[in-house]
Amino acid sequence: MSKRINVQYELPTHECQSWQEGDWLVFQCPHCAFLRKLNWRSNEMVTLNQGKPGTLHKGMHSPVSEKLAHQTASN
């Protein structure tokens, strides 16, 4: 009989900045060297630098037109 043990702990999390370069969405961490690119057409993903070990990185990308529409609606 096997036992299952769940260990929960929180890893540090860094919020990434994003921008678009052609078909590529670029995510870069302002706190460490993490750098990842995602091709939105082909779904190819390339991690160019893993950044600080043991750190989770997250981020979102909104096209400029979507950001402007949201700002206009908020005003």
Image (spheres, rainbow, N blue to C red):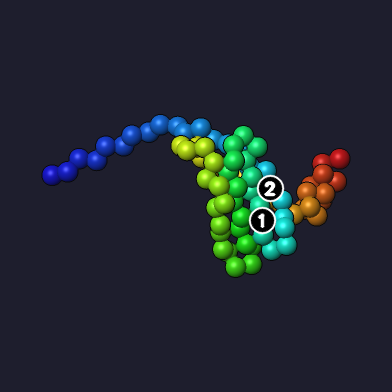
In the figure, 10 relative to 72: above or below? above
Q: Secondary structure at mark 2?
A: strand
Quadrant containing the N terminus in the rendered view: top left
Residue furthest to the bottom: 42
Which of the labelled discs sits on residue 18, or is there none? 2
The extreme left residue here reads 1
Q: Position of residue 74 (x, y in %)?
A: 82, 41
Q: Residue 5: image x %, image y %?
A: 27, 37
C-beta proximity under 8 Å, tags 1 and 2: yes
Q: Judge whether residue 44 can be spotted in this image.
A: yes
Residue that badge 1 annotates = 25
Q: Image quadrant of residue 29?
A: top right
64 or 73, nearer to the observer: 64
**Residue depicted at 62% across the width and 34% down the height:** 31
Mark carried by residue 62: none
SS for callout 1? strand
17 or 33: which is nearer to us? 33
Q: Earlier in the sequence, mark 1 or mark 2?
A: 2
Residue 67 vs residue 45, the one in the foreground: 45
Residue type highlighted by circle 1: Leu
